[in-house]
Amino acid sequence: MKIQKSRLALAGIILITILSCNQTEDVTAVDENVTLSLAFEQFDKNNTDIYLDGSNVVIETNGLPNHTTPYWGAGNALYVAPQAGFQATPSLITGFDGSATLTVPVNPKKASSATSTSLGSIGIAITGAAIFNDSEGNGPLNSAAVSLDYTGAHIGPGVYHYHTEPYAFTNDDDKLVGIMADGFFIYGRKCNSTGNYPTDLDASNGHTTITKYATDPTYHYHIDNDLYLNKYYIIFPGKYQGTPNAIR
Ligand SMILES: [Zn+2]
Ligand SMILES: [Zn+2]
C-alpha cells in the first residue's frame, strides 16, 4: 500500500512536470518571433545599445572599436604602435563622431533580388565599429590598403571601419563578426555548422545552416575566403541578399 501511494505521488509529479514542460514550450513558441537573437549578446555592451521595437531590432552604436589600433593616437590607453609598412591616414578615431543607428527586422528575409552595397557603413561589427565594402572612395581598396591597421581597419575619411578580416576578434574561425544592413549576421571564414570553410555559399558568401546562436537553420554571411592582394580577406565584397536599411 505504501509503495502504491509513492507510485501515485511519483506519477503525479511526472504529470505535473510534463504539463509544465508543455507550458514552457508554448510560451517559447509564442515569444520566438519577437525575441532578440542570442548573437546580439556578442556585441560590446559599452559601445552598443540593442533593443526590440515591435518586430524590429534597433542597434545603436557609438562607432568606436573596443580594441587597440594606432588610430586611437599616441597617449590613448588603446593606442598600439603600427605594424611594419603601415602608412596611417591623417585621421584619428577621437576626431570623429561615429555614432549610428541601424533598424532591421527581428527575422529578416531574403529579397527577390540582390542589392549592391554602397560606400559608407554597410554593417555594424560586434565591437561597435563600422563594416565597409571592398571599395575606397570610388575605386578598389588596393591603393588604400597600406593604411589598414593590423585588424583590417582605418579612417579615411570619417568613421573607423573594417574592410578586411578583423583580426582583433576573428582570425580564420567561425566567430560572429557583426550584422549587415539587411539584418543578416556575418561570421568568420569558417562555419559553426561544420567547423570548416563552407562549400555551399552563394554569390554573397551566404547560406542557410544552423549557427552558434540559433538551432533553426538561419541565413547568414561569411567573410570572403578568397585572398585579396595576397594578404587580406575582404569582409563583404558582394551584394546584400536581403533588403538593406540605412545606417546613420
Ligand atoms: Zn576605408
Ligand atoms: Zn555558415
Image (cartoon, rainbow, N blue to C red):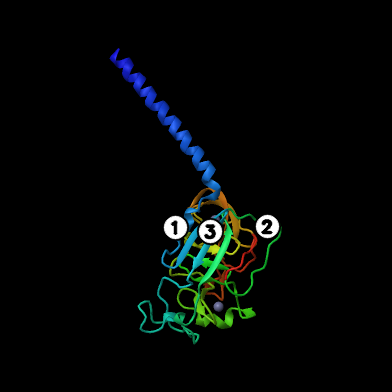
Three-letter amino acid code of the residue under disc 2: Ala
Residue 180 image label:
none
**Which residue was labeled with disc 3?**
197
User: Element at badge 1?
Assistant: helix
Label 1 and label 3: CA atoms lie apart by: 24 Å
In this view, 185 is above or below 119: above
**Which residue was labeled with disc 2?**
111
**Which residue was labeled with disc 1?**
41
For the residues carrying marks 2 and 3, which lies nearer the camera in this image? 2
The earlier-in-sequence mark between 1 and 2 is 1
Three-letter amino acid code of the residue under disc 1: Glu
For the residues carrying marks 1 and 3, which lies nearer the camera in this image? 1
Label 1 and label 2: CA atoms lie apart by: 26 Å
Q: Residue drawn 52% across and 45% down?
A: 31
Q: Could you say where residue 203 lies in the image, as x and y percent from the top left?
A: 65, 62
Q: Could you say where residue 234 lies in the image, as x and y percent from the top left?
A: 56, 70
Question: What is the residue that sits farthest to the front in this orientation?
Answer: 54
Would you say the beta carbon of the disc 2 residue lies within 8 angstroms of ligand 2? Answer: no
Label 1 neighbour load within 10 Å: few <14, some 14-19, many 20+: few
Three-letter amino acid code of the residue under disc 3: Tyr
Q: Quadrant of the N terminus?
A: top left
Question: What is the residue that sits farthest to the left in this orientation?
Answer: 2
Q: Are marks 2 and 3 in contact (CB under 8 Å)?
A: no
